[in-house]
Amino acid sequence: MIAALPMYDMVALQGANDAFWAAVREALRARGIAAPDTLNRDIGMWEGWQSPDLVLGQTCGMPYRIRLHGTVTLIAAADYGLDDTPPGYYHSVFVARADAPGDGPEAFAADRFAYNQPESHSGWAAPQTWAAARGFRFDPAVETGGHRLSALAVVEGRADIAALDAVSWRFLTRYDPALTDRLRVVGRTQTAPGLPFIAAPGADAAATLAALSEGLAGLDRSTRETLSIRGFVAIPAADYLAVPTPPGP
């Protein structure tokens, strides 16, 4: 059995994620669903997402629509209470150095663009779709391996602009202000369905969603505020599949 929540699991959040999983685990077991004692932080993301033993995982919308759809059970997306964004949805923010000239992402159209990985919706697909709607593509591109690393690449001058998912940006501003104070938000992308919680094929989606909701409700206020999760929204698979996927790097 595997449970892994790698998408928002920076060190500052791991205690809250562990408490959340413990509560969800008991809610799953109460519904007759076997669940592992602890989260697995050693397994690779794709290995976890594609495991036939996955009890609960969280992936990104782009991996779901391009490879995982039809091979996993879609559960729900979390509502992170983002401003001007429907519950269960999210967007990316464009960030540039605080002292960089330019009033919007278009001002950086010809500059170096940092992205976390090519199969990321928030870091690659969303900003490139935004740019394509305005007649350009962010290029040249610098792959960093993570949202924080993209922000760091901009701060250090190895890139000039990056797109970070708004939840990651929230956590970075909260827990890494030495980094984010050297950046400014210069725009945002369109909204898209949020990062989906998934399970292996054949899982009981309704029971797992109920366990997620019950587990969240059982947490103390401080832990809920740390996670920034207000609830869960069951978003249809068709909504994920309708999101555009631009060409890769």
Image (tube, grey):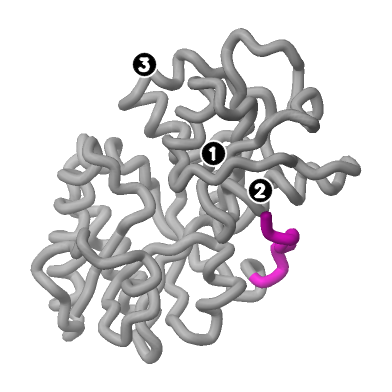
Q: Is mark 3 on a helix, strand or loop?
A: helix
Q: What stretch is highlighted in magenta?
A: 241-249
Alpha carbons under labels 2 and 1: distance apart: 13 Å
Across and down, in percent, residue 102 comes to 75, 15
Q: Is mark 1 on a helix, strand or loop?
A: strand
Q: Disc 2 or 1, which lies upstream in sequence?
A: 1
145 vs 36: above or below? above
Across and down, in percent, residue 205 comes to 39, 80
Q: Please name whichever residue, 217 or 156, is drawn nearer the observer in this view of the structure.
A: 156
Q: Residue at x 27, y 69 (%)?
A: 211
Disc assigned to residue 164:
1
Across and down, in percent, residue 125 comes to 66, 54
Q: Which quadrant of the figure contains the C terminus?
A: bottom right
Q: Residue at x 71, y 63 (%)?
A: 245
Q: Please name whichever residue, 32 or 103, is drawn nearer the observer in this view of the structure.
A: 103
Eye-nearest disc, 3 or 2: 3
Which amino acid is tagged 2? Thr
Across and down, in percent, residue 33 comes to 20, 83
Disc 2: which residue: 191
Res 199 visible: yes
Question: Tag 1: Cα neighbours inside 10 Å, few (<14), some, or many (≥20)?
Answer: many
Q: Disc 3 or 2, which lies upstream in sequence?
A: 3
